[in-house]
Image (cartoon, helix red, strand yellow):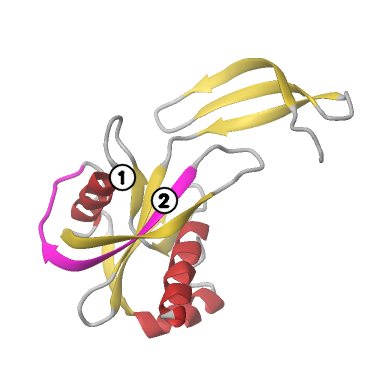
Amino acid sequence: MVKPEKTLATQQIYHGRAINVRVDTVEKASGEKTTREVVEHSECVAIVPLDEQDNVLLVRQFRHVVDKFLLEIPAGGIDPGEELIDAVRRELQEEIGYFPQKIERLGGFYTIPGYGTEYLHCFLATDLVPARLVAEDTDEIELVRVPLNQIRQLIASGEICDGKSIAALLMLLFIRQRR
């Protein structure tokens, strides 16, 4: 069995609002020393909201980093001390204006384990009731309802092209197929 790398030193490079960046000096199992650049990001929730008509409630929003509008599932950070379920409820109220009465865990994954620490907890939210929480950055989010049976095609065509949305939506479709 291969031994894990041993961290010898850590240097903080950047401390920001959303991320921190550090460079770790590590010793590999072979004894070789090298560096690892690490983007530190807190855990997040990603939610597939599904209404009574089997429509997925997606959000279309401009993403500066890729310079385009993306069609995504609602997602966001977990506030310090906040429970996962409370983060799910808050994010849905902020982003799409609905409160989920039923929340079911789909799974979770590391988004970029080669250089980042972010872990996404994925959930299915149903029995949605209109309820809006005001948030600072959600005024430019467009709500888009998509029938669940069209999700595979939107992923295959590239219209849904961000990893968290693809992963969580496929988790839901897989679970539904097994039932």
Task: Kindly identify the residue that appears in the image at 39 percent across and 44 percent down.
Answer: 44
Q: Position of residue 124 (x, y in %)?
A: 32, 64
x, y percentage for residue 177?
45, 81
Q: In the rendered structure, which amino acid carries the disc numbered 1?
A: Leu
The residues colored magenta run 119-135
Kind of residue at badge 2: His
Q: Please tell me which of labels 2 and 1 falls first in the chain.
A: 1
Q: Can you tell which mark lies on residue 121?
A: 2
Q: For numbered disc 2, what is the local secondary structure?
A: strand
Is-magenta flag for residue 74? no
SS class, disc 1: helix
Mark 2–mark 1 Cα distance, whole angstroms, equals 8 Å
**Residue 127 falls inside the magenta stretch:** yes
Which quarter of the rendering shows the C terminus? bottom left
Q: Position of residue 112 (x, y in %)?
A: 59, 46
Q: Which residue is mark 1?
A: 84
Q: Nearer the viewer, residue 118 or 6?
A: 6
Residue at the location (29% across, 71% down)? 144
